Image (cartoon, rainbow, N blue to C red):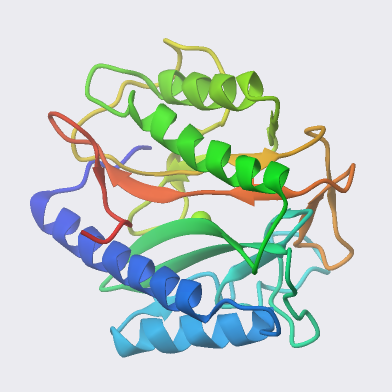
């Protein structure tokens, strides 16, 4: 079921989302060759704590037998890792890498979710294009995140934009409603048919998150049961914001004003 948030719930959502954005800012400032993804994890945890939030991803159940709950405060996914990378002391970022950081701040009963892909030093031109197209795909999608449109309109806009630019969207994972739970209805695929799916209503809060691969769309799961990589080994990118559907334009809650 899709929860329409009340005014007071929206205020709490805004606060959790602002903390998520501030945490991304702290990570962005720290990224440089030589830093480990574990160090980024600690920065995220400390930043959220400073603002009275906790990292909701930590301890998130895998739902798979034999796979432990998620151990990190962030997902840190380097190069060909698409999503759900586990931060590690052994994983040192180097010049030319990209790292996707997906994080969720939880405060006063609500979640704020956002993902960014960062460059480490200088990266190649095609990778820069991947980052630009993935981010722009989000903005193409939210042109339809308005009262009167449907989920499929957002999905279709994202998928078409990515494919028109020669990259592939991941089909096995998708955006989602968000609020008291990190994952609520509706699911928001990054591909689909315009005019399909549920109608958008003011008060819905949605995490819209294009996941894009440079090469083929096929993915594999790492042995840790969490990390998702591109099968062909090409780079992958992730860009996500939590948004609020209003009577007019959508409000992006995880970008600092
Ligand atoms: Mg996320």
Quarter that holds the N terminus: top left
Quarter that holds the C terminus: bottom left
- Residue 150: x percent and y percent? 36, 19
Query: Residue 153 sits in which quadrant?
Result: top left
Compared to residue 46, the image places residue 142 above or below, namely above
Q: Residue at point 48% right, 21% down?
A: 157
Q: Is residue 224 left or right of residue 63?
A: right
Compared to residue 226, the image places residue 134 above or below, namely above
Q: Nearer the viewer, residue 234 or 55?
A: 234
For residue 61, say whether it is visible.
no
- Residue 120: x percent and y percent? 64, 68
Query: Residue 125 sits in which quadrant?
Result: top right
Q: Residue at point 82% right, 32% down?
A: 216
- Residue 228: x percent and y percent? 77, 53
Q: Residue at point 86% right, 60% down?
A: 222
Compared to residue 172, the image places residue 153 above or below, namely above
Q: Residue at point 80% right, 35% down?
A: 215
Q: Nearer the viewer, residue 38 or 245?
A: 38
Q: Nearer the viewer, residue 193 or 180?
A: 193
């Amino acid at each position: 079921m899709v929860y329409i948030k009340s005014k007071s719930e929206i205020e709490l959502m805004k606060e959790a989302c602002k903390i998520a954005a501030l945490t991304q800012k702290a990570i962005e400032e720290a990224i440089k060759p030589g830093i480990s993804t574990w160090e980024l994890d600690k920065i995220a945890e400390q930043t959220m704590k400073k603002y009275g939030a906790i990292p909701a991803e930590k301890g998130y159940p895998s739902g798979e037998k034999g796979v432990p709950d998620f151990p990190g405060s962030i997902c840190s996914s380097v190069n060909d890792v698409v999503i759900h990378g586990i931060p590690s002391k052994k994983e040192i970022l180097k010049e030319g890498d990209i790292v996707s950081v997906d994080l969720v701040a939880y405060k006063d009963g609500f979640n704020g979710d956002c993902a960014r892909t960062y460059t480490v030093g200088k990266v190649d031109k095609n990778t820069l294009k991947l980052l630009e197209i993935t981010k722009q795909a989000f903005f193409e999608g939210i042109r339809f995140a308005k009262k009167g449109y449907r989920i499929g309109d957002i999905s279709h806009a994202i998928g078409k934009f990515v494919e028109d630019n020669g990259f592939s969207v991941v089909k096995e994972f998708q955006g989602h409603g968000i609020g008291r739970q990190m994952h609520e209805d509706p699911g928001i695929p990054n591909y689909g048919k315009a005019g399909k799916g549920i109608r958008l209503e003011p008060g819905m809060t949605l995490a819209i998150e294009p996941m894009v691969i440079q090469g083929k769309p096929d993915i594999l799961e790492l042995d840790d049961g969490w990390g998702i990589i591109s099968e062909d080994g090409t780079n992958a990118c992730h860009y996500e914001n939590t948004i609020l559907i209003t009577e007019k334009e959508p409000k992006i809650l995880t970008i600092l004003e």
